Image (tube, rainbow, N blue to C red):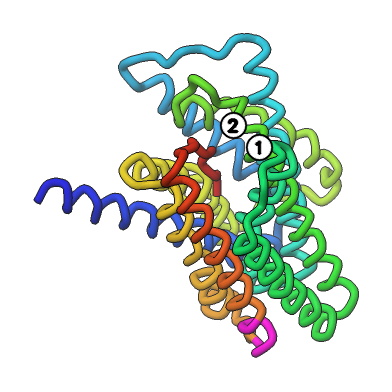
């Protein structure tokens, strides 16, 4: 009975993380009306870094400190997976739509898988190849729809979101080495500190547009920092430690579903049939890739880096 309860709580934790992360696109789109994309990242991750610093200091047992070389790799992964990735995401969402972002992000797991295969030179099974081609076709449908409806600006935003997927894949591959011997909280703290510092420097490009955000924008920024950057990560890792990684990644396929719903409810966006079809094709491709991956994991388990939403 206790084991069943643990599984239920773990599943609910990962679902909650998916809900927080998927809502970030619609919330970011709202904040962009009054705050620049670089300033949003600076505010969001500075708040998150402060909260993580408090959590690290408050816990009873101190974690093992990374050495100088590992610390440099962790900071590099933070700049890659937080600063560069969210620069591309925030600007992409500003030019495109929250619904496009939610659907395109569904292709990110397979981008990570492709980069891992390229780096480690492992053989790609036919089922996984079919999944990659399906996901690529779905992403093409979403991007083409954006170009038809929103013109060049929305198309460029969608392309930036796809480039963000490649950056996120690089972060995951680097994270496999950078995070060795570090627990989730300590690793996230160091990565977030580096990412926040990078965003603070980048936000100086918007210094002429700086102004105090209104109450609504401030509340949404706090939500992005507390719920999406800190809460989502901790919930995901709580569940990940109590289930296999393939199950957790499959649950994260709810992100595009929740994300599109958030875009409709929060932003009032209209979702076209081409977008829905593209999203379904992407998720089908990801599912095909994960079926083969789950089989491989069953034969030779490999610890994967946890994503940060």
Q: Is residue 168 left or right of residue 238?
A: right
* Residue topped by disc 1: 173
The dominant secondary structure in magenta is helix
Please give the name of the residue rendered at 66% of the width and 88% of the height, measured from the top-left corner: 272
3D distance between C-alphas at marks 2 and 1: 6 Å
Please give the name of the residue rendered at 46% of the width and 13% of the height, measured from the top-left corner: 64
- Residue 114 percent coordinates (x, y): 70, 50
- Residue 146 percent coordinates (x, y): 78, 78
Circle on res. 283: none
Please give the name of the residue rendered at 74% of the width and 79% of the height, measured from the top-left corner: 141
* Residue topped by disc 2: 176
Q: Are marks 2 and 1 in contact (CB under 8 Å)?
A: yes
- Residue 289 percent coordinates (x, y): 57, 60
Q: How crowded is mark 2: few (under 14 residues within 10 Å), some or many (20 or more)?
A: some
Is 294 within the magenta?
no
Residue farthest to the top, as pictured = 67
The magenta stretch is 272-277
Does dot 2 land on a helix, a strand or a loop? helix
Q: In which quarter of the image is residue 172?
A: top right
């Amino acid at each position: 009975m206790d084991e069943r309860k643990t599984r239920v709580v773990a599943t609910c934790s990962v679902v909650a993380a998916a809900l927080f992360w998927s809502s970030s696109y619609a919330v970011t789109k709202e904040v962009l009306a009054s705050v620049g994309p670089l300033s949003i990242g600076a505010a969001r991750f500075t708040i998150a870094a402060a909260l993580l610093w408090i959590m690290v200091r408050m816990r009873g047992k101190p974690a093992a400190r990374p050495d100088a070389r590992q610390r440099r790799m962790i900071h590099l992964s933070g700049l890659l997976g937080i600063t560069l990735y969210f620069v591309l995401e925030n600007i992409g969402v500003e030019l495109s739509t929250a619904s496009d972002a939610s659907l395109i992000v569904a292709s990110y797991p397979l981008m990570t898988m492709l980069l891992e295969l390229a780096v480690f030179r492992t053989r790609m099974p036919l089922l996984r190849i079919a999944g990659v081609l399906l996901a690529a076709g779905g992403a093409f449908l979403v991007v083409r729809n954006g170009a038809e409806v929103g013109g060049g600006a929305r198309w460029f935003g969608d392309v930036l979101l796809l480039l963000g997927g490649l950056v996120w894949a690089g972060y995951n591959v680097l994270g496999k080495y950078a995070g060795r011997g570090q627990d989730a909280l300590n690793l996230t703290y160091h990565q977030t500190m580096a990412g926040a510092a990078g965003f603070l420097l980048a936000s100086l490009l918007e210094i002429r547009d700086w102004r105090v955000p209104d109450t609504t924008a401030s509340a949404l920024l706090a939500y992005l920092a507390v719920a999406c950057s800190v809460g989502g990560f901790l919930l995901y890792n709580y569940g990940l430690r109590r289930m296999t990684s393939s199950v957790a990644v499959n649950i994260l396929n709810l992100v595009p579903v929740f994300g599109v719903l958030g875009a409709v409810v929060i932003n009032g966006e209209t979702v076209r049939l081409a977008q829905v079809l593209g999203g379904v094709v992407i998720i089908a491709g990801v599912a095909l890739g994960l079926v083969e991956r789950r089989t491989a994991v069953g034969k030779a388990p490999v610890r994967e880096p946890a994503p940060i939403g």
